[in-house]
Amino acid sequence: MSATPVLALRGVSKRFGAVQALTDVDLEVNAGEVVALVGDNGAGKSTLVKAIAGVGPADEGELLWKGGAVQVQRPHDAQDLGIATVYQDLALCDNLDVVGNLFLGREIRRAGVLDEVEMERRSRELLNQLSIRIPSVRIPVASLSGGQRQTVAIARSMLGEPGLVILDEPTAALGVEQTAQVLDLVERLRERGLAVILISHNMADVKAVANRVAVLRLGRNNGVFDVATTSQEEIISAITGATENAVTRRTARIAEDQK
Amino acid sequence: MSTDVSKSPEPEGGVGSGPAAEPPAAAAVTAVDPRLLVREQGFRGYANEFLRRMRSGELGSVPVVVGLIVIWAIFQSLDSSFLSAQNLSNLSIYIVGTGLISVGIVFVLLLGEIDLSVGSVSGLAGAVFAVMAVNNGAPEWLALLAALATGAAAGAVHGFFFARIGVPAFVVTLAGLLAWNGLMLQVLDRSGTINLDDEGLVAKLTSHYFDDVAAAYGLAAVAVLVFGLAQYLDARRRDAAGVPSRPMVEIAVRTGVLAVFAFAAAYMLNQYRGLPLALLIFLVVLVVFDFVLRRTTYGRKVFALGGNTEAARRAGINVVAIRISVFSLAGTMAAFGGLMIASRIAAANQGAGSGNLLMEAIAAAVIGGTSLFGGRGKVWSALLGMLVIGSIASGLALLGSPAHVQYMITGGVLLAAVVIDSVSRRTQKTAGRT
């Protein structure tokens, strides 16, 4: 890679009591690139994302943001850097309309009063830029479909003009058409030059939009694959550990002994 | 709320990136999802939109307005003096005290919480005022401020234990209900009942009328003008910004409806003794708090907390501060309402703030259309709900019914309101709205 990655993780480790959740994990994401983060349940995907987002800071290891080492101890630190995270539960207020949700916590004011017109104009502008189609920006979020809610949550993360967007299983609960909408949106984020980390269980989704796939297994890196040149089977075997054999076991054990 | 989306331009290119998902028939894709019900223009569209909302459970103020008309019709047929100028004027003063308390309750309900202490706090405020102003001869304005501050402090204590310590608001305010009532008895001590100065500031709150006919008509005219102008300017600004705006016909109809109600009320008030000061205060409070709730970041935060606390927290909203401030506001409004009630009976006594005052204040907010489940409601429900409760009380009093009948009927109305709230919430769920 010629350019400096937007975000690089070096040797990130995290321990919960007796469980070593992450061990020496490395990860790089470049601008205009979608990196899929895959792994079995308990592989450490969410822990890694929480470490990046500042929700659960890593015990060891360093974060490089655009080449410089940074400390992310609180969610606020990550947001200030330009890391936007869309969690699985979306964190939308059902009773507020789309505009209210998009601008929640960063309302535009005019003479101390909410500037609804300006917020609505910018909401429509943003949704149009991202080609997000929702009935009206003035209906409560509760009346949107799952896919539409997901796109609203992603659009909301874009308002802070982030450099990196982390999407935690954005298609997990969606139907075919809605998944397609969300994947379209992920591609549009990439076209806008953003770095995207996409967590997903769905290999088809990963193959469709990701440039590279980083596999985690039992809290360790288990390979980074180029989507274009790797077959789905290879990725899945990296996830499940089917590539494990006597040789890899021995190297792992030797590495462990040397510690 | 308009659902006009026809103006959004179709962005090029983006849709084509997911060819597998696009059915071949969707070659001419527009920005509007074809499954959407787009509102038709003109009056017919307005009527259709209204019917659709009713069916999907967005009842808004319709049940309470219908209920009010029914109640008025029934009492008028039983006693022709019910809709007399004098009775309606008295009604407009009667609703102010409890209505002010109810405004605070609306805020608490929007958080999805409840405040059971407002009755006791209102009694305490009346006692604090009476002891300071009457027994100790302090200036009335100082005693009034002290009473309001007492309410604010009591509310802040509830808010602290609820928001910071994490005790359920129900229990905290139940403790407050008892404790503040005890404190009121302590403050009143052996005096029992303290009569207020008839010519004093607080007594004037409910006994003063602007008897010049120009006052009521002027207020109505100002209200209609400001409302119409604000709507018109908003629509102009929306058009300029290229976002959907209300059609001019709709603005005219809304302003017209408001004008009919405002001038009819002004006419009735002028038939008796003119515009009551208490009613003016209540209306000003309603307008101010409605503005706070709908047009300021503070109000937006209150709604967000009622909708999804976790989402609000992640959006950087100081959940603890908002919660404490809302409970403090409820305490302040309870104190304000308590002063109004003390003013109406021209005394602070040991029975103040007890009885059905608390139930009426909560019932008014719920009957007026504020949801018990948080996140939905408006300040005006305090007025609408109190009109219903006050009308029942006044009508039954005219008919000479005893208090227990009034309790049973008000209880039934409250139950009906909660049922409507719950059912409409369920209908909205199935219709995809909460």
Image (spheres, rainbow, N blue to C red):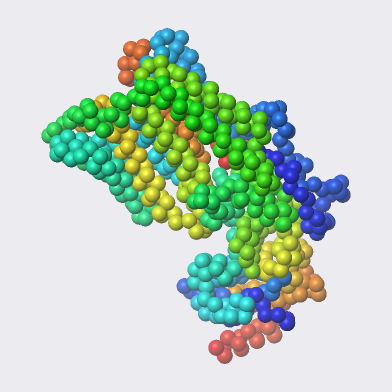
B137 in relation to B341, above or below: below
Closer to the camera, A227 or B133? Answer: B133
A158 in relation to B382, above or below: below
Q: In which quarter of the image is residue A193?
A: bottom right
Residue B30, image x, y percentages: 80, 47
Residue B364, image x, y percentages: 42, 30
Q: Which residue lies furthest to the bottom in this view?
A: A258
The answer to whether residue A97 is seen in the rendering is: yes
Q: Which residue lies furthest to the left in this view?
A: B190
A157 in relation to B133, above or below: below
| Left or right, residue A96 beside residue B406 | right
Quadrant of image for the C terminus of chain A:
bottom right
Residue B137, image x, y percentages: 15, 38
Number of numbered markers = 0
Closer to the camera, B124 or A241? Answer: B124
Residue at the image point whose x is 43% and y is 18% from the top:
B268
The answer to whether residue B433 is seen in the rendering is: no
Q: In which quarter of the image is residue A27?
A: bottom right
